Amino acid sequence: MIKKEMIAMLLAGGQGSRLGVLTAKVAKPAVSFGGKYRIIDFPLSNCINSGIDTVGVLTQYQPLRLNTHIGIGIPWDLDRNIGGVTVLPPYEKSANTEWYTGTANAIYQNIDYMENYNPEYVLILSGDHIYKMDYEVMLDFHKKNGAEVTIAAMPVPMEEAKRFGIVITDENRKIVDFEEKPENPRSNLASMGIYIFNWKTLKEALITKAEQPALDFGKHVIPYCHEKGAPLYAYEFNGYWKDVGTLNSYWEANMELIDIVPEFNLYEEYWKIYTKSNQVSPQYISGESVVERSLIGEGSEIYGRVYNSVIGCGVKIGRGTVVCDSIIMNDTVIGDGCEVNKGIIAENVVVGNRVRLGVGDEAENDTMPHIYNHGIATIGERSIVPDDISVGKNTVIAGVTGREDYPDGALASGKSLIKAGD
Amino acid sequence: MKAIGIILAGGNNHRMKELTQKRAISAMPIAGSYRGIDFALSNMTNSRIQRVAVFTQYNARSLEDHLRSSKWWDFGRKQGGLSVFAPTVTSENSTWYRGTADAIWQNLSYLKNAHEPYVVITSGDCVYKMDYNKVLEYHIEKKADITVVVKDMPEGTNVERFGTVKMNEDCRIEEFEEKPLMAKSNTISCGIYIIRRRQLIELIERSAMEERMDFVRDILIRYKNVKRIVGYKTKEYWSNIASVDDYFRTNMDFLKPEIRNYFFGEYPNIYSKVEDLPPAKYNVGMSVKNSLISSGSIINGTVEDSVVFKEVFIGNNCYIKNSIILNDVYIGDNTHIENCIVEGHDTIRANSYYKGEDGIKVVVENSERYVL
């Protein structure tokens, strides 16, 4: 009989709506990060590096990119005879067919998958954080304490604690209470959305709470286990961990990779991050170009000047173009004589010649100020921007745009240009 | 495809100087992130050849490491796939491969067990892109016994290190000289052959009986008046990397946009082992001009007109000009390197100075990376 000590369930179905047009066509875990990676590469690499070779990936929102990226798991060595990676979308049943209505509901609908592997422990992960963590160490902690549930938590500054789910523990890290986004937090240990459950405990809780609408780990399953008196522990994590939930935090996390010795170091031999890459060719830096403080991916061709930027694979940057403080994702082409300041340009975008992006005065975005802020100019994937256009700050462009979409050849700061039906 | 493939990758020669002390020529890193054999393997898979054997002999460790998983070239198949044949001792045979024909003879069961009617033979040390199906069509149309891919080299090329051919108006090869003292023609054999499988088995068996070991000398040249050996002229890019100068020039060719576009931009692609390296990193105070930089590298100094391979670290205030830095080299601060090839995995101490004065200098240091 198949027996796996611990299997992982990776929640990758979320939209990540605060990433705006970046997640218009892809789920958040499939968004590019750090030049050549996608966000889901981090938890998947952590799994294989921690010795977990059975991973179920739960997808729901826009799964196409995610499916093609994961494939049969070859880049992560997760193509296994027994186990490996399995993509688990919602499916039709003879009765009670439904979408995944909550994090725990998604896991509940895949009880059969987990049962197949007869696990001792189940690790619940989410596909939208940037970090390196050895789950095996967390499992040792779980076993040592005789816990039924262990929650990974990290200390955050007290003033920020009210943005998180907070756990309150005794001196042995045993959890005594929870607070969800508290006004006056009693602790600064924030839950990272990483849980280890004893399989028996998890299964019992999921079945008992199955009828709960939008069954959620933080809101329902963990409080249920706590009320039942199961021993819950908090595993303190002190490494780099970044939630890239907003455009600004996404931009910052990318920029942090550029530091001379970044806090989150991709160049270590130990604990490699794996990704599917089609491109292996080297990058070309031309005679007239300048590159400083930047990361550049495989097969890119740079003819312009690049400062403080993260450039993906297969990107072309034309002659006389200046790119500053920007993120440019795979296979995007930027024409000649352009200027890009603090831009996030998604994959397969074509920017014409002499386009000025991220210029002009600050102005709040007029439709979605909670998404497009901090002066970032965002362009969604497969967009086209015509020649001789000037685009302001806190702007967003998506879709194939032509000259006629830009009165006076400009998109003023704070304006949105999202072409429907793309 | 109606053919199986053979890639001859056992070779080594003195023209590579120190560079092949570590590896066979076919395993030489090329164009920033490839190995010599990637081109032959990619051509095979892109021509939909499903069964390929690589013959190795000389210093094959690096090559075998590169080929350890065949999935990068799509050869991880139940049907066919990639085999690596190093010489083995059997009850009938206890020698190394004594020549290319002998290598095939020692693995004749590979040919006998196949059912595809044709064999494509190529070498692992050439950089080119080719659809072998086109050559095979030509082979059939010309009713050839053996088809040899040939190329006109530009005036001034040192063709004496290749096999030179002269063809008649029907493209039949009338003269074939291996490494001639004085070449009579500037048309050379590219080392790519197509032949019917049964024909090859017969020729190899007969040669073995007569103790003849070399495919070119003992089959192509010996049989050229008996068998119909025709040339298929290619006008596309083809370059052999088996001498220091040619190796250097071939790498530098990739600084030209049209060459890069031909190999990296145009479909089908050239494949190589994927190594999961992070993007190249450019720190403050560096400058890179007209150069290829590969992933995993960290650049702090100045690089001009050079090819930098994977996982190279270039220290502060270095000056690298017109040079090739192979994989995983660490270059300490204030180092000057000009007209050089720096051997892979090497450590160059800070404040070093290397310059190739007349021609390209091969730098092999073997210093310790971490001084305790």
Image (spheres, rainbow, N blue to C red):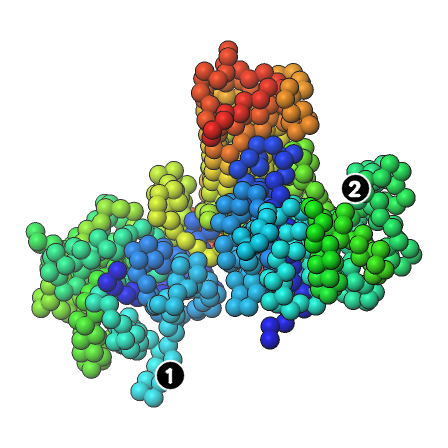
Q: Are marks 1 and 2 on the same chain?
A: no
Q: In percent of the image, x 13 and y 61: which residue is there?
A: B144
Q: In percent of the image, x 59 and y 47: which residue is there?
A: A99
Label 2: how many Cα within 10 Å (few below 14, some 14–19, many 20+): some
Looking at the image, can residue A238 be seen? Answer: no
- Name the residue carrying label 1: B89
- Name the residue carrying label 2: A164
Q: Measure how far apart labels 1 and 2 are at the Cα level.
A: 68 Å
Q: Is A131 on the left or on the right of B363, as rendered?
A: right
Return the chain for callout 2.
A
Up/down of A183 relative to A48, above or below: above
* Helix, strand or loop for disc 2: loop
Q: Amino acid at mark 2?
A: Phe
Q: Foreground: A12 or A200?
A: A200
Q: Position of residue A325 (x, y in %)?
A: 62, 30
Return the chain for callout 1.
B
Label 1: how many Cα within 10 Å (few below 14, some 14–19, many 20+): few
Q: In percent of the image, x 81 and y 63: which residue is there?
A: A147
Q: Is B33 on the left or on the right of B179, as rendered?
A: right
- Looking at the rendering, in which quadrant would you find the C terminus of chain B? bottom right
Looking at the image, can residue A11 be seen? Answer: yes
* Helix, strand or loop for disc 1: loop
Q: Amino acid at mark 1?
A: Val
Q: Foreground: B255 or B112?
A: B112
Q: Position of residue B283 (x, y in %)?
A: 62, 39
